Image (tube, rainbow, N blue to C red):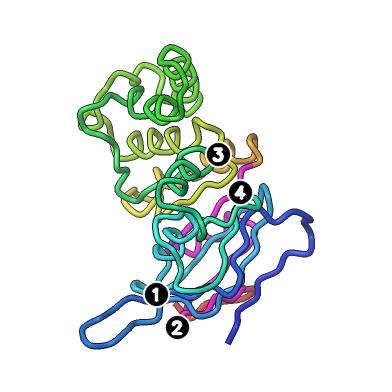
Amino acid sequence: MSSLISNSSRDTSLIQLSAVSHSYPESDTVHSVLKDVNLSIAQGEKLALLGRSGSGKTTLLNLVAGIDIPDSGIITLDGENIASQTETQRTVFRRQHIGFIYQFFNLVPSLTALENVALVLELNGENSSDALDKSHNLLQRLGLAGKEHRFPSRLSGGEQQRVAIARALVHSPAIVLADEPTGNLDARTGEEVLAVLHEVLAERDSCLLLVTHSLAVARTTDRILTLEEGIISEQHGEFAW
């Protein structure tokens, strides 16, 4: 069975999954996570992906990011077939064109907030001075003025997630992938962080694929998809979970 999600209101597909399947071994069997999935996401579009724990939501993000490759099918990002690239090519492409926001922040503990953000630009070949200037400006934009030189351990959860957002956006990626970005935050802080994320994404016309368990978070996006038994479908009404 194929799940086709289309978007007639936009002309350009920035992310395209065509007949993508993925599985992994589980005990003596093979567990199929994605089954012949077709998905199209346009530039500037924001999608939420809902699903039960273990349904394969994070696996889908990892496939789009080129961290994993599908068993079959084609994944193109801005016209590039990442499934056919070498691991090194996928790493470079991800570093230049994709921003990834993790639930558990994944900041480097030995680096300050400013250094965590600037590292992305430096890895992309930008000189240190320019990287620090851009990172400083973005952290201020995200409400962290005066806290740029603090280490992650000296920041609150909401502040760490703002640093993580800055790190994901500082190189102006076309694609932002977010895995439960508010999952470790209280409701009020989560709303604030999500508002900042959407505001900056809109300014840069980046597309967003956001994995969440929260229907309230999902409803802040343009479209809501669900992943169940390996099949993606678009939702227009109430949910079973």
Which amino acid type is marked by label 4?
Cys
Q: Residues within 10 Å of mark 2 (few under 14, many from 20)?
A: some
Q: Residue furthest top?
A: 129
User: Can you identify the residue that label 1 sits on?
Assistant: 55
Q: Write the residue at 34% across / 73% down.
A: 54
Residue 241 in magenta?
A: no
Structural distance between the alpha carbons of marks 3 and 4: 9 Å
User: Can you identify the residue that label 2 sits on?
Assistant: 229
Q: Is residue 15 left or right of residue 7?
A: left
Asked whether residue 217 is in view, the answer is no
Q: Dot 4: what SS?
A: strand
Q: Residues within 10 Å of mark 3 (few under 14, many from 20)?
A: many
First of labels 4, 2 by sequence position: 4
Could you say where residue 156 lies in the image, as x and y percent from the top left?
28, 35
Q: Is residue 30 left or right of residue 177?
A: left
Dots 1 and 2: beta carbons under 8 Å?
Answer: yes
User: Can you identify the residue that label 4 sits on?
Assistant: 207
Position of the N terminus by quadrant? bottom right
Q: Write the residue at 63% across / 36% down.
A: 204
Above or below, 68 against 34 in this view is above
Q: State the residue in front, 191 or 56.
A: 56
Could you say where residue 96 lies in the image, as x and y percent from the top left?
51, 37
First of labels 1, 3 by sequence position: 1
Q: Write the residue at 34% across / 82% down.
A: 31
Structural distance between the alpha carbons of marks 4 and 1: 23 Å
Query: Looking at the rendered structure, which numbered label has been put on residue 173?
Result: 3
Q: Is residue 126 left or right of residue 220?
A: left
First of labels 2, 3 by sequence position: 3
Task: Magenta stretch: give its range.
Answer: 206-235
